[in-house]
Image (spheres, rainbow, N blue to C red):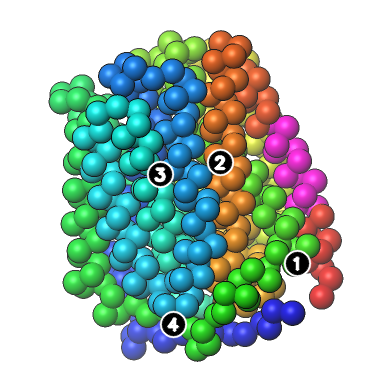
Amino acid sequence: MIQVEVARISQPAVNRGRALPICLIILCQSFQTVSSAGIALLLPSIRNDLALSFTQGGTLAAANIFSYALMQIPAGYLADRYGVEKTFIIGSFGTTLFCLTFGLVADHGYAILNQTLAGIFHAFLFQSGLALQASLFGAERRATAMGLSMVAIILGQLLINSLGPSLSEHFSWRFPFIFFGFAGMLSSLAYLWYGHAFAHAESSLKLSFIDAFRLFQHPFMWVYGMIQCIRLGIMQGISFWLPSLLIDEKSLPLAATGLILALRALLIAPSTMLGSYLSDRLRKPTAIMEVSLVILAITTAALVTVGHRGLLIALIFINAIFIQFYFGPLFALPVERYGIRMMATLGGFGNFFANLGAFSFTYLLGALKDHTGYFRSGFYAITGACLVGLVLTLVLEEMRRRP
């Protein structure tokens, strides 16, 4: 049986001392999905330059997600075992280095290798970033702290979707990756020099490798993991293929698509924080999850059937509000049950399942597009997954009520 321990986490001497590390952590986290968001946005140009099919285009995202998924539990364990700051800096620098070098790839093979290695460092960055943010907030604001990590990711996506099209048109599709990768590496160095002296998140007990894998013995964690699988499958499937849907099937120009995606990202960031705040305030995390999944099921199905551009854009924005609305509540549930000592490992467990879903959905939608010629069947599959997630959320709430 896993013992529930409360870690003793050293806090900054004064509250204002938290501002600098929080800002630098958010800055570093903002670059962690710039590469994948840039690939999704610029995929038509990348496909033309590297002569890729839709299925091969999907493998670029799938390769990153697959290695990222496999590293989730090891990355969380190593962060809990050896210190989240060490793994955070390694993850931040490595992720942005491979973002930069993606702009230099010459063919599909090198692109797959680049994204596979990027996924490994991304795992360290994500798990350590969650734990670092949580260490700077109290237990009563844990969902809010975790929501900040998603806000950072969305801010990065907002930047690439806003600036990517113009940089690509003035130079080439390669330049945005080089530009943002270099900026991200500088951000990593800034945290190394100025941020790490203020933020500390060290557990009073060192976690054993056996403790981490004992999580697989718990039915609660299996249900939680399946919901995480669906959550990121929905998020990644829509985020990766939405640009291609808008450009190839809805005939929108690249500049308009980039603007829509930037506004979409702008909506996701505050809605993530709002969902986390409501969860902390109301103490009803599963209710937040249920509402989100119902709305996602309806709007995702409608995206491929609606022809009117104004209505289509409205559906995209409504979908965006709820696509990560339940991120903070979901990640906070296992910490509520098992304690903060295993925070990074618990996050790694959930994100392992989440990225299996992201890998599967991203590849599936590309394969279905090649097979049928349309995105309709793939988006309907996402709708079905939302409904399965709703049922699993009801099961999880029943398990949560039991000691």
Q: Residues within 10 Å of mark 1 (few under 14, many from 20)?
A: few
> Percent position (x, y) of residue 313?
49, 24
- Amino acid bearing label 2: Ala
Q: Residues within 10 Å of mark 2 (few under 14, many from 20)?
A: many
Which segment is the magenta one? Answer: 383-394
> Percent position (x, y) of residue 105?
25, 33
Reply yes or no: does residue 390 show up in magenta: yes
In the picture of the structure, the residue carrying the numbered disc 4 is 202
In the picture of the structure, the residue carrying the numbered disc 3 is 116
Instruction: Say which element carries label 1.
Output: loop
The mark closer to the camera, 1 or 4, is 1
Contact (CB < 8 A) between labels 3 and 2?
Answer: no
Q: Residue at x 47, y 64 (%)?
A: 75
Task: Work out whether 238 lies above or below 367.
Answer: below
Q: Residue at x 70, y 38 (%)?
A: 386
Main SS of residues in magenta: helix
The mark closer to the camera, 3 or 1, is 3
Give left or right: position of 59 versus 101: right
Q: Residue at x 40, y 84 (%)?
A: 11
Task: Work out whether 388 lies above or below 214.
Answer: above
Q: Residues within 10 Å of mark 3 (few under 14, many from 20)?
A: many
Reply yes or no: does residue 276 show up in magenta: no
> Percent position (x, y) of residue 319?
57, 35
| Circle nearer the N terminus (3, 2) | 3
In the picture of the structure, the residue carrying the numbered disc 2 is 358
Q: CA distance from mark 1 to mark 4?
A: 26 Å
| Circle nearer the N terminus (3, 4) | 3
